[in-house]
Image (cartoon, rainbow, N blue to C red):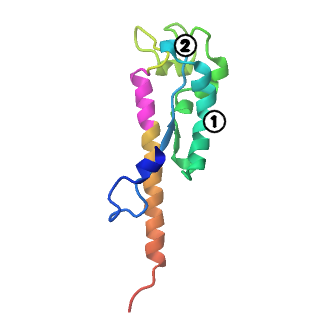
Amino acid sequence: MIDVVRTLGRPEHNETGPEIFLSVPPPLMKNMAYGMNQTVINDFLPSFIPKIAAANKIPAAKVISVFEALGGESKSGFPVNGCTIQNCKTLSYCKYYCGAITCDQCHPSDEGYGMIAATVAKALTKSVESSYLRGRQQYAAAPIAS
């Protein structure tokens, strides 16, 4: 799929094709919520997606870890029964899955979606700033025609 995406765009305007970012999905708070396997989502994907990026020469800076942003680094402490309204007050990452009256073990709350947006925006902003600085350096290094 990455190879297909690389062919998209207008080559006359961008010789390298589109910038590609990969995202590590948010953690699953409870095993088998919506039939999903917590081991695959919380253990396999966070290590496998960066390997996919490396194999496709996508810089590590373009792998966005929504997993970590929504509390994935705390996975060993996830409650067996997932996030609840009660433990939402004591487990900081549960706020990303609990609203005022319910908790979803997979789909983020408004606060969770806000954190995803902020995480993606930060990665995109860094990429744009980096591209801008590279362009300025190339411009500054170019010989001046006389």
The residue stretch that appears in magenta: 108-118
Between marks 1 and 2, how big is the CA–CA gap? 20 Å
Q: What percent of the width, then of the height, locates residue 51?
A: 62, 42
Instruction: Tell me if residue 56 comes above or below residue 88 in the rendering.
Output: below
Give SS at disc 1: helix
Badge 2 element: loop
Residue 109 within the magenta-colored segment of the rendering:
yes
Disc 1 marks a residue whose amino acid type is Ser
Q: Position of residue 43 (x, y in %)?
A: 63, 27
Up-down relation of residue 1 to residue 67 (above or below) = below
Of residues 2 and 137, which is closer to you in this image?
2
Q: Residues within 10 Å of mark 1 (few under 14, many from 20)?
A: few
**Observer-nearest residue: 7 or 50?**
7
Residue 116 lies in quadrant? top left
Give the residue drawn at x 44%, y 67%. 135
Q: Amino acid at mark 2?
A: Met
| Crowd band around label 2 with a 10 angstrom C-alpha radius: few (<14), some (14–19), many (20+) | few
Residue 66 is inside the magenta segment = no
Instruction: Work out whether mark 1 precedes mark 2 in sequence or the reverse, and give the earlier one.
Output: 2
**Residue at the far right in the pictured view:** 76
Q: Position of residue 141 (x, y in %)?
A: 49, 77
Q: Which mark is residue 47?
A: 1
Name the one closer to the observer, 112 or 104: 104
The residue at the point 42 percent across, 24 percent down is 111
Q: Main secondary structure of the magenta part?
A: helix
Q: Quadrant of the C terminus?
A: bottom left
Cβ–Cβ under 8 Å for marks 1 and 2:
no
Give the residue number, with chain letter if any, for mark 2.
Answer: 32
Return the residue nearer the eye: 44 or 131: 44
